[in-house]
Image (cartoon, rainbow, N blue to C red):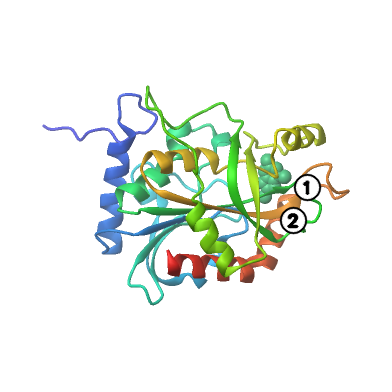
Amino acid sequence: MTSRPSLDLSDPSVDPFDVAAAAAAVIAERTGAPRHDIALVLGSGWGPTADLVGETVATVDNTDVPGFAAAAVAGHSGTMRSVEVAGSGRRALVFGTRTHFYEGRGVRAVVHAVRTAAAAGCSTIVLTNGCGGLDPDWAPGTPVLIRDHINLTAASPVEGATFVDLTDLYSPRLRALAREIDPGLAEGVYVQFRGPHYETPAEVRMAKVLGGDLVGMSTTLEAIAARQSGMEVLGVSLVTNAAAGISEQPLSHEEVLEAGRDAAQRCGELLSAVVARI
Ligand code: 8IG
């Protein structure tokens, strides 16, 4: 009897790129698309924007795809979709949820969607998130382009002595394109904390001293993995709340979801216009 190779990402003897290739094969079969061109990861508050990107041709449950797990956060959907980008003939692979570092499933699980997108043929990835803003002028519902990041997780998706250049990680070309579409877009430095608790006001002040503008719990590890796989990266944050200590308001996940609903139109128009022109 032959045994199938393990596709368990938590097994150190398994190559995560083999699991990504197996996942991409399942996606190709389920969506009828031998390859996808652009990937999108939808963070907190970004769910309603996906419909504006194009027509959903197929929806696949995460649990049917090797290496993926069910959604862990309210407001995220545990599916991925194959979307025909309006007017371009290209296909987008849209992940409705992500695995967060704070879930404790390891960095491989965190970046598995990114590696799967690369294995599926994507040369560009749009990483979105909901986050806290340090600039008091950024009202909840303000989208901000990620210019650069500070990774405070003390982890890396890169294994072994592979030295990945992160200069211009967040593509200047794609940021310029996004600003052509929405000239009022701000840019900022995204600081990833481990979470899942929000920061203390002192930690938010620290992030500011370090050069940060946005605080969140995702994106940096995924962006690093995307660059390792040779993809061009666009990062867009939706400021869903003022970071702790910036305003009087206490932080709540309800506020996050509400800001997402309110900002859906502007964010959806931005995403769909960017994706159409990539
Ligand atoms: I939505 O204020 C959202 N995610 N770390 N801090 C951190 N993550 C977040 C925040 C926030 N808001």
Local crowd size for mark 2, using a 10 Å CA cut-off: few (<14), some (14–19), many (≥20): some
Tell me, yes or no, whether the two marked residues, 2 and 1, touch with CB atoms within 8 Å.
yes
Q: Nearer the viewer, residue 150 or 268?
A: 150
Q: Is residue 261 left or right of residue 46?
A: right
Quadrant of the image containing the C terminus: bottom left
Q: Is residue 196 above or below residue 118?
A: above
Label 2 sits on a secondary structure element that is helix
Above or below — where is 246 with respect to 180?
Answer: above
Mark 2: amino acid: Glu
Compare residues 17 and 134 and report the one nearer the observer: 134
Relative to the observer, which residue lies in front, 58 or 178? 178
Q: Quick one: SS at disc 1?
A: loop
Residue furthest out toward the right: 248
The reply to whether the residue tagged 1 has its Cβ within 8 angstroms of ligand 1 is: yes
Instruction: Residue at 33% x, 44% y: name it.
Output: 66
Q: Quadrant of residue 20?
A: top left
Return the x and y of residue 165 as percentages of the image width and height: 44, 35
Quote the CA–CA distance across marks 2 and 1. Answer: 7 Å
Which disc, if any, is residue 251? 1
Residue 152 visible in the shown view: yes
Q: Tell me which residue sits at (55%, 45%) in the image.
A: 72
- Name which residue type carries label 1: Leu
- The N terminus sits in image quarter: top left
Q: Which mark is residue 124?
A: none
Q: Pick the residue in front: 117 or 210.
A: 210
Residue beneath disc 2: 255
Rendered location of residue 81, percent (x, y): 41, 62
Residue 77: % across, % down: 52, 56
